[in-house]
Amino acid sequence: MSMISVKGLRKTFGKNEVLKGVDIEIQPGEVVAIVGPSGCGKSTFLRCLNLLEKPTGGSIIYHGTDLVTAPPKESTKLLLGMGMVFQQFNLFPHKTVLDNIMLAPVKVQGVNKKTAEERAMALLQTVGLADKRDAYPNQLSGGQQQRIAIARSLALQPEVMLFDEPTSALDPEMVGEVLDVMKKLAAEGMTMLVVTHEMGFAREAADRVIFIDGGVIVEDSEPQEFFAHPKNKRLQDFLSKML
Ligand code: ADP
Ligand code: MG
């Protein structure tokens, strides 16, 4: 059974119809890379999935509930299962690394501090930054801050992670360390949707790659097929410019 089933998803801003009927099924453990030109609606799609934007139409079935029409109380609870990481890390500047990671589990989930700290330390090990527990965000590089942002999101123990261009704001030499953390997560079986311009990551780490054009998904295939034999003409043009 699909973990997330999206049907006919639409989103309009004023007169601008950005998503015109997106259909996609996400299976548990799948890593789906989402690519496409700037402005095609990649972020809007991810933000609709977790209701950061209110969809204009269609359905998002998650744990048997349609998030689009569910009462806020119900959708809010379900959405704790989805973590999100943005291009900008948005760490709390006046809190230490450890406090950044512990905050939501303690405040939102009511986890006791000792458990939250143990969990946070385990996550810091995972992202390779255990020695930075007492540092403040501005004492860290961009790559380190983004690894902390990933750990913070994982602290709520989501079953699916949404990444919106997590390496786009980073200096080139820091992209690899963040992608490595994401590859590790993928290898551990996390379900992931990743908007990215890193074609190497899409090729190596994704199970499927999708291309959005004109408000719909026009290509959805395994990486090998996607890159070697793109069927859609716009995707062919896009790839010829990227590679
Ligand atoms: P991408 O992430 O693929 O670059 P976006 O999803 O950010 O594209 O944007 C798709 C389109 O939706 C763009 O035309 C953008 O201007 C528009 N858009 C995105 N967010 C908003 C918003 N909050 N209000 C109005 N228009 C928006
Ligand atoms: Mg975007």
Image (cartoon, rainbow, N blue to C red):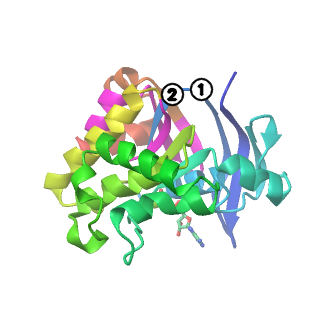
Say whether residue 133 is visible.
yes
Please give the count of numbered marks on the rendered protein.
2
Q: Which residue is mark 2?
A: 30
Q: Viewed as shown, does residue 169 lie left or right of 173?
A: right
Q: Viewed as shown, does residue 103 lie left or right of 201?
A: right
Percent of width and height locating residue 210: 48, 36
| Magenta stretch encompasses residue 109 | no
Question: Pointer 1: residues within 10 angstroms few (<14), some, or many (20+)?
Answer: some
Q: Amino acid at mark 2?
A: Glu
Percent of width and height locating residue 90: 42, 69
Q: Quarter-wise, where is residue 55 in the image?
A: bottom right
Range covered by the magenta-colored residues:
190-218
Element class at badge 2: loop
Marks 1 and 2: in contact by CB < 8 Å? yes
Q: Nearer the viewer, residue 6 or 243?
A: 6
Q: Nearer the viewer, residue 233 or 166?
A: 166
Q: Amino acid at mark 1?
A: Gln
| On screen, residue 65 above or below 57 | above
Q: Residue at x 67, y 50 (%)?
A: 79
Quadrant position of the C terminus in the picture = top left
Q: Nearer the viewer, residue 100 or 68?
A: 100
Q: Nearer the viewer, residue 142 or 9?
A: 142
| On screen, residue 211 above or below 41 | above
Specify the quarter for ligand 1.
bottom right
Q: Which mark is residue 27?
A: 1
